[in-house]
Each structure stands twice: as C-alpha cells, then as structure tokens.
Image: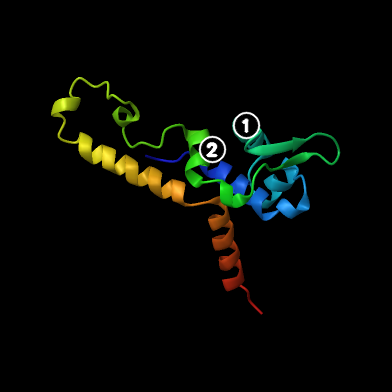
C-alpha cells in the first residue's frame, strides 16, 4: 500500500484546518501558502472531502472552510479512505465473501487479512487531534533563542 500525494495533502490540509479552527473559515489560498500546496490541487481535494459531516463551507469575501467536528472526531483512516479508497494491501480482502476462486486454498490470504486489519486499526486509532498535538509538541521542541 502506498498513500498518494492526494491522501498526504488531504491530511496536511485537515491538520491545517484543525490548527486554525479558532480563526473561523479558512481560505484555500491561506492553506496553500502555509502548506506549500497549489491552490488548484487543494480544490481537487476539497471536491472529495467537502461533505456536511466533514467540512463546513462559507462563500464570499469571508469564505473558506472549517472542520465540521472537533479534531478528535476525525481519524487518519477516515480521511485516507475518502481520498484513497480502500487501505487494504491486496484487493481480495476488500470483499466478503472473498470472490477469488483460490480463496479456500490460498496460503497467503490469512496474512493479507491480518495485515489489512492491523493497518486499518492503527490508522483508525490516530486522530487529527493526535497529529495536531504531535506537531505542536515538535514545534515547541524546536524553539531556538
């Protein structure tokens, strides 16, 4: 499994919104400048994640985006699934029942199922708030006088 640029940038955008949630609605141009991601690419990502239970949008001069929920209520797994689709290492474990004709005799199927479970459980255990907290802790640790 390899996370695409779209998935990585979606996480960066969501972290940015979480870090600036007290600022109200955030314009894409501001996220673009802070994250060094093109505004056009952010517009593509917004088109995927702009759902009522994920983001709030406001049009106009004070327009922009903000999180629909608290950062602790978003998981990395949830965000990546919106942009990447399945997070399974192989396609066959996405189906129940497994549609592969070799499933009954597949020596590797249990390993793929377990790996998929570990990946999903881990990514679903990390919240946007966890990422914000870690980022802020690293920023504090890097303070130079």
What is the x, y in percent for residue 76?
50, 46
> Which residue bears the numbered disc 1?
44
Label 1 with label 2: CB-CB less than 8 Å: yes
Q: Look at mark 2 in the image and give the residue it sits on.
A: 6
Q: Is residue 31 above or below residue 96?
A: below
Up/down of 100 relative to 81, above or below: above
Q: Residue at x 59, y 31 (%)?
A: 48
Tell me where residue 78 appears, x and y as whole percent: 50, 40
Whole-percent x and y of residue 26? 75, 45
- In percent of width and height, residue 64 lies at 76, 40
* 129 or 137: nearer the viewer: 129
User: Residue at horizontal 52%, vertical 51%?
Assistant: 127
Residue at the far right: name it: 61
Residue 21 as seen in the image, left or right of residue 125: right
Identify the mark at residue 84; answer none if there is no mark. none
For marks 1 and 2, the one nearer the N-term is 2
Label 1, residues with CA under 10 Å away: few <14, some 14-19, many ≥20: few
Q: Quadrant of residue 112?
A: top left
The residue shown at (29%, 28%) is 92
Q: Quadrant of the N terminus?
A: top left
Q: How many marks?
A: 2
Which secondary structure, mark 1?
helix
Q: Is residue 118 above or below residue 104?
A: below
| Nearer-the-camera pick, 42 or 97 | 97
Colour treatment of the image: rainbow
Is label 2 in a helix, a strand or a loop? helix
Residue at the far bottom in the pictured view? 145
Relative side of 93 to 39, left or right: left
For marks 1 and 2, give the CA distance: 9 Å
Depicted 130 relative to depicted 8: above or below: below
């Amino acid at each position: 499994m390899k996370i695409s640029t779209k998935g990585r940038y979606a996480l960066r955008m969501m972290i940015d919104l979480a870090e600036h949630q007290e600022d109200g609605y955030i314009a894409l141009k501001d996220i673009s400048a802070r994250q060094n991601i093109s505004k056009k690419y952010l517009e593509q990502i917004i088109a995927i994640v702009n759902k009522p239970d994920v983001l709030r949008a406001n049009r106009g001069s004070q327009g922009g985006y903000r999180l629909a929920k608290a950062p602790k209520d978003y998981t990395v797994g949830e965000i990546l699934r919106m942009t990447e689709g399945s997070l399974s290492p192989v396609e066959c474990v996405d189906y129940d029942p497994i549609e592969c004709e070799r499933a009954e005799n597949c020596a590797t199927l249990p390993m793929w199922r377990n790996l998929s479970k570990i990946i999903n459980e881990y990514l679903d255990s990390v919240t946007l708030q966890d990422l914000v907290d870690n980022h802020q802790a690293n920023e504090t640790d890097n303070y130079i006088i």
